[in-house]
Image (spheres, rainbow, N blue to C red):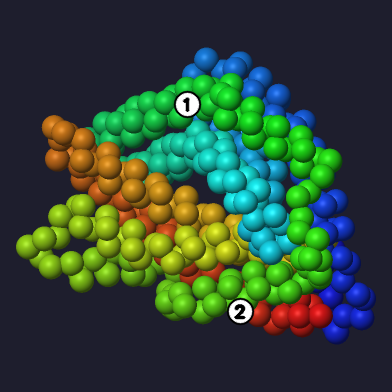
Amino acid sequence: MTELPTTECTDHPAPAEEVLAEYLHARAGAFLRALPLAVGEAGSRTGSLPSGGGSQAVAGGTGELLRCVRRIGGALHTFAPVFEPVWAEETRTELRWLSGLLAQEPGYVRRSARLLAAVDSLSETDPGRAGMLAGHAGAPKARALMERQLTLARTRAHTTLLQELRSARLHALADRMTLLAGEVPMLPEAAGALRPQVATALGLLAEGAAALPPVRTPYGGEGLHRLGAVPVQSATRVDADLVLAADDAPWHRVRILVKRARYALEVCGASLAELDGIDRVLDRHQEAADAAVTVSSAARTPRITPATAYVLGVVHADQRLEVEAARYAFGHQWPTLQHHGWHAWASC
């Protein structure tokens, strides 16, 4: 990968069909190589993935398969006018299905690691570093509750993954990838340059980022304060979850636009380090928001003690503050991207 040029470009863009075909051939080949590895990895585990970090959760064949799925799907979305529409839409639908399937179990692994680490950190009793939950009677019970629920969810996700990796639906998708490794169904009249589509993807990202609210402080807890908009008589936990979900939605959309822009640039053999950094920030935002939802769900467990509920409330607030911190980081990093020169590059 190379950085985008910051000066006016003089090279002539390569034909879309040639560059796209080469890119998709390579990704489809990688898909086919990773698939048996992923099936073997899933079959060798009798339960869920180990409760390690995110890198462990997406390592090996499963991680490579997920990367291929996302990049092929991104290319089919961004450069849609070039492809035979029925084939492209059907393939994207199947890729979305597999992407969700592959991402589910690693997502639970990361969420478990994040939430258990949060409880442990808040429960620290070191002199001068005592956490808010240090010595609290509800901390061990809250930790055990979240660990038990997430382990069960990971096990179910693993079982589903193992079943679907042997399904006729996956075999049909593998057949599609086998064909894609040799031939890409393109429209003969759709030949053209890649950069107009890349410019569109970057433009949509810029519009989405511009619509986000400004974040002025790193740990202001603004998302929590916005819950005040819910009327007191109806401010149940479910109402709060709905308000926070609506608050998070535009950020999650921008995260998707960032990934599509990254994958579009990758097709062109280009990259933006700033965009990669923003992608990581928004991944953190997504992880913290999802973790907060998990804690909120755990707090609805019947017959938990008030002490356990209190600890879960503290952990929920901690994750929402992590959401705000990620937004603050985005607000500082995004302006640097605006001055990188990608507008001129993509418009050539």
- The residue located at (60%, 63%) in the rendering is 258
Q: Amino acid at mark 1?
A: Thr
Element class at badge 2: helix
Rendered image quadrant of residue 323: bottom left
Residue 129 visible in the shown view: no
- The residue located at (76%, 50%) in the rendering is 185
**215 over 169 or under it: above or below:** below
Element class at badge 1: helix
Rendered image quadrant of residue 182: top right
- The residue located at (40%, 54%) in the rendering is 289
- The residue located at (23%, 42%) in the rendering is 299
Looking at the image, which is closer to me, 60 or 22?
A: 22
Residue 248 visible in the shown view: yes
Residue 331 spot, x, y in % from top left: 53, 74
Q: Which quadrant, please, contains the N terminus?
A: bottom right
Q: Amino acid at mark 2?
A: Pro
**340 on left or right of 214:** right
- Mark 2, Cα crowd under 10 Å, few <14 / some 14-19 / many 20+, is few
Which residue does the numbered mark 2 point to in the structure image?
A: 335
